[in-house]
Image (spheres, rainbow, N blue to C red):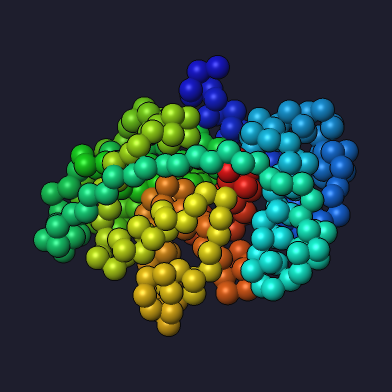
Amino acid sequence: MSTLKHLQQANQDFERVNRALSYLDTNWRRRPDLSALAAHCGLGADQFHRVFTRWTGTSAKRLMDALAHDDARYALLRGTSVMDAALNAGLSGPSRLHDLFLAFEAVTPGEAKRRGAGLKFIWGTAPTPFGLGVFLVAPRGLSALGFVDDGNEHTGFLDFQTRYPAASFKRNDQIATDWAQKIFVDHAPLPLALYGTSWQRQVWRALIAIPAGKTITYGQLAQQLGDAKAARAVGTAVGRNPISWLIPCHRVLGKDRRLTGYHWGVNRKRSMLAWEAANS
């Protein structure tokens, strides 16, 4: 299968798998079987299994194991007994770990002050495992990545354009597809052109230090950055993250460890965390 067809297939599977992930988010402790999950998604058991494993790279059973393992880990950190935590853990989750190395290059203060004047961006869309990806590419590297539903690509583009109102933009979907392959197929080291304040870039670097398959709260992230009282400021910088997925703001949870607002949709955030839990 060609790279483009592979990404198109993942994009088509996203909606159906997302329904299953939303259901599992509140029902995984009940361990619904394959037939129950398939019925919830309006598919036959065999078809559901093919779609789910094609998108996540694992089975629904192994994903539930991973969710249970993660839940037990946090239960132990809260002081729960080993036996009580083990009752919820089930089998150990997948062990494969994938590391992504990123190179950073920031603009100068003068460039930032000019609101993008003189900068030339390429933007475009390409299918991804999390819906339609909207890519913004600068000469120095990737400057923005977001996700939208099919038909809403201009909404994603306008979101990026408002960040750099004085810049020039040219559309090229082939370049976007090339970046989609690098990110979601090749998992290659990537140059990022980060356009943000010193504080924002500090927070974004801290986000990349969160391992795939793990999560952290805003308060914990603020503490790592040296100021436990700065959770709100951290949250603001996280919300301004322009490069979703690669700078993993989806790994940051609310104080009660619940999913909180995500710029590209809470359901998409849940899907990203489930993908990583299954493949970490």
Picture coordinates of residue 117, whole percent (x, y): 15, 54
Decide if residue 116 is on the left or right side of residue 18: left
Picture coordinates of residue 188, whole percent (x, y): 38, 33
Decide if residue 129 is on the left or right side of residue 27: left
Q: Residue at x 37, y 70 (%)?
A: 225
Camera-side residue of 235 and 177: 235
- Residue closest to the far front: 82
Camera-side residue of 200 and 277: 277
45 is higher (above) or lower (below) than 236: above
Q: Quadrant of residue 68?
A: bottom right
Q: Is residue 225 visible?
A: yes
Picture coordinates of residue 108, whole percent (x, y): 14, 57
- Residue closest to the far top: 1
36 is higher (above) or lower (below) than 7: below
Q: Quadrant of residue 94?
A: top right
139 is higher (above) or lower (below) than 253: above
Q: Give the total of numbered labels.
A: 0
Quadrant (top left, top right, bottom left, bottom right) of the C terminus: top right
Camera-side residue of 140 and 100: 100
Q: Residue at x 18, y 54 (%)?
A: 107
Q: Is residue 114 visible?
A: no
Q: Quadrant of residue 35?
A: top right
Camera-side residue of 194 and 98: 98
Quadrant (top left, top right, bottom left, bottom right) of the N terminus: top right
Q: Residue at x 43, y 82 (%)?
A: 229
Picture coordinates of residue 198, whole percent (x, y): 24, 65
